[in-house]
Image (tube, grey):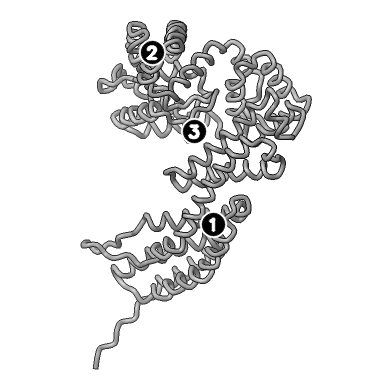
Amino acid sequence: MPDRHQLTLKIKSYLDALSPRAIRTLLRSLEHARSQGSDDPHLDLILDACLNAVRTTDTLVLDGEPRGGRLQRAFYRPIEDLLANEGLSGKVPGRINRSSLPLIWTWMSRDLAPKAFGSAEEVSMRMETEPQTVETLAEDLREQAMPLVAETLAEAHSSDRVHQKIAMLVGGERALRDLHDILAAFNARPWLDGLRESLPVRLTEWDFKAGSPSLLRIKAVMDRHGEQAPLIASIVLSRVEIADTLLALTASLAGSTSIKKMAASPYAIFAEMAFSEAERFSAIACGACSNAELAEALNAYCRLMKTIDRHYDLAESGTWQQRMAVTRRSVSALVTRELEAMTGSVRRALLVPRLDEAGEPKTDTAAIEEAHRGMMLLDKMRDAADSLAVNEITARTRTALDQSLEIKTRALLSELSQKAGAERKAHLVAVDAAIGLCESYFGKEYADQLRRSRKAALATEPKKQSAAS
């Protein structure tokens, strides 16, 4: 990860090249992104740099929209490592959905302590208010709000009517359960912060070996505060490099790699977190996501499932086995659908596009993206086809591509030199799409050969048609 000082210098250099108006526009967009739950690790750093740049213009307000949202961010900052950004299909104890936070904040500021929240918000939105002051305001609000939240939740526990009302106001049952976790996390801060300070920033499997300081520390905290095991596990999850190490942690704490013994131990929550990550990766992959997001989710899912298949017998725990079977079926169905459609996507991607009224090619970007998505999935299945039971469709798709992709690409290249003007421009779109797909499938060396052929074809003037006699 880049050094913080170097990042600050780069950000400052970038901002110095912007006009004050552009900086203000950037600041507003960053504030909006943060309020929507962005987890960019550099977002606050950029926000502070923008604020300093705005201050140099002696401007105390920003087009009537001072830094709204920073008080809310400061309020929730102590539980940042408990937040889950996307993919959780249901409530996982100890993991707080980031999407629940805005409505909970609105409810607290409107119904619990409107005067205190309103006053603090007004001060925090002044451009001259320093970040440390905002942190102090947030701390004061937590001290005032949490006892009121506790009273309200106690009332909701004893009254179905109040329960339904509060659930509706904060965004539903899952958000209400998130509110319970928020209250527990704030109340447990004295010892949770101690745990945070005692653990490395990044935890690896080596940190969970028998006798390691981190393992002993986690065990001691779990034994003392077992009633808050989900919060402890969520903090540990936020620090592991890969989710499957949580299974190694569970095995070390339980003293056995037997799934049955791990599930029966008081440390089963760590394995639960690992399985919840598998479910989250599956949900992301099977949802509406970009090719990059799909690749990342699929990589993480396949790695986790490979670890489970190699080292643990899920048949010993029916519940965990059923949960993982559901994710496996979902991901397998996704891969099957994508690969079945892949040959058609590749065929559409390699079509020479038509020209629009201005003589420009109408590129079918969606078809090209779908073809690259299929290529990426096909590559991932080199190691995961057995686990997902997609060997047959994978082999069939590879055979079809082996027979068609190279032939079609060579045909496009051979025709390129004969095209001129707008037709050549349209033909070039298909050639470039073909070379990109060949690079994904055959590798860079082969793609470079095709690029040299492309260059040679472009250097050749098309032959003029001989006059009819």
Category of crowding for the residue at label 3, using alpha-carbon neighbours closer than 10 angstroms: few (below 14), some (14–19), many (at least 20): many
Query: Which residue is the site of mark 2?
Result: 162
Q: Residue at x 71, y 20 (%)?
A: 219
Point out which mark residue 88 bears.
3
- Camera-nearest label, 2 or 3: 2
- Residue 372 image point, x, y percent: 46, 56
- Residue 303 image point, x, y percent: 62, 44
CA–CA distance between discs 1 and 3? 26 Å
Seen in the picture, residue 34 relative to 132 is either above or below; the reply is below
Seen in the picture, residue 207 relative to 79 is either above or below; the reply is below
Camera-side residue of 79 and 336: 336
Query: Which residue is the site of mark 1?
Result: 378
Seen in the picture, residue 28 relative to 427 is either above or below; the reply is above
| Residue most extreme to the bottom | 469
Viewer can see residue 9: no
- Camera-nearest label, 1 or 2: 2
Q: In which quarter of the image is residue 217?
A: top right
Amino acid beneath label 1: Leu
Amino acid beneath label 3: Leu
The mark that comes first in sequence, 1 or 3, is 3
CA–CA distance between discs 2 and 3? 26 Å
Amino acid beneath label 2: Val
- Residue 319 image point, x, y percent: 61, 35
